[in-house]
Image (cartoon, grey):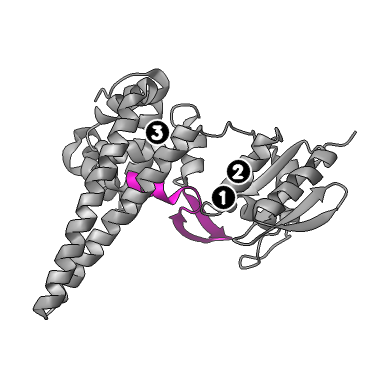
Amino acid sequence: MDAIYVGIDVSKDKLDVHVRPSGEAFAVARDGKGLRELVERLRVIAPTLVVLEATGGFETIVVAALAAAELRVVIVNPAQVRYFAKALGQRAKSDPIDASVIADFGAAVKPEPRALPDETARLLAELVGRRGQIVDMVTAEGQRESHAINVRVRKSIKRHIAVLKKELAELEGDIDGLVRASAIWREKEDLLLTFPGVGQTIARALLADLPELGRLTRREIASLVGVSPFIRQSGKWKGHSKIAGGRASVRKALYMAAMTAINHNDVLREFYQHLLARGKLKMVALIAVARKILTILNAMLRDKKSWQPA
């Protein structure tokens, strides 16, 4: 019997589904009724694997519903699917990726499903995400205050900033309690904090948004996060290295860690300066530092060892 692969193109309001190799295609709403219909139809089909792209969180509820129905499901990097389609000549650079391409990618690559994070891990991810939103709001309000001329407007902004900072403190307390209550997370956080350049905020962002840290190879983890550079090249023309796809929240955390590390971590500062001396652009060198940090942190959690400069 042929293996059956299902590709699902997730959008805000609906799910487009393609079944391979039968070619069956259908769409359901991305709501409770639509998810029940999806699960019922896929149970009848009994697919080998269901494949979805990461779409900024819209896929989470879909994956949860499928996993609860004991269907094998995996979330893949959208950039990998696009490169796959381009390599086969199925899509141009600006063409949308549809469910049939996602199903073909699953059949060809056979990505390995990973266990969903438990309810506590999802709660931590939401708390960390909300903290980031409030920090952004405080920053934005601070900029508005600096440009405000009217006294009443400045007072209004200050009151709002005070409310936001109070909420921020409460969220940080919730996050601290959640992390420190888990022996596993507490051990991981303590290991991450031994690395010069990783503070509590960055460590908890990694715990929340990169639960695979310490369980993958260095190439797999770099690809998952989206810090594996690729070079645009055609004939004799060779462009700059670029990164794309992956988890933006984790890249942001690593970027901040890299900024701190090149000033306070002797090993990383020397690595960064060496790249600049070779003529690398500052941003390219900084991304290389971020990837090196990711590789080191991955090894630290894998081996359960604290940071050792040597």
Q: Amino acid at mark 3?
A: Thr
Is residue 139 visible in the rendered image? The answer is: yes
Neighbour tally class for label 1: few under 14, some 14-19, many 20 plus, Cα within 10 Å: many
- Mark 1 or 3, nearer chain start: 1
Residue placed under numbered mark 2 in the picture: 75
Give how far across and how far down residue 214 sits, in percent: 44, 27
Query: 280 or 9, which lies in front?
Result: 9
Outermost residue on the bottom side: it is: 150
Residue 295's disc is: 3
Q: Disc 1 to disc 3, how far (Cα)? A: 22 Å
Q: Quadrant of residue 295?
A: top left
Secondary structure state at the residue bearing disc 1? loop
Going 41% across and 45% down the picture, which residue do you hit?
A: 126
In this image, 137 relative to 102: left or right? left
Foreground mark, 2 or 3, reads 2
Check contact, mark 2 vs mark 1: CB within 8 A. yes
Mark 1: amino acid: Ala
Q: Position of residue 246 (x, y in %)?
A: 49, 48
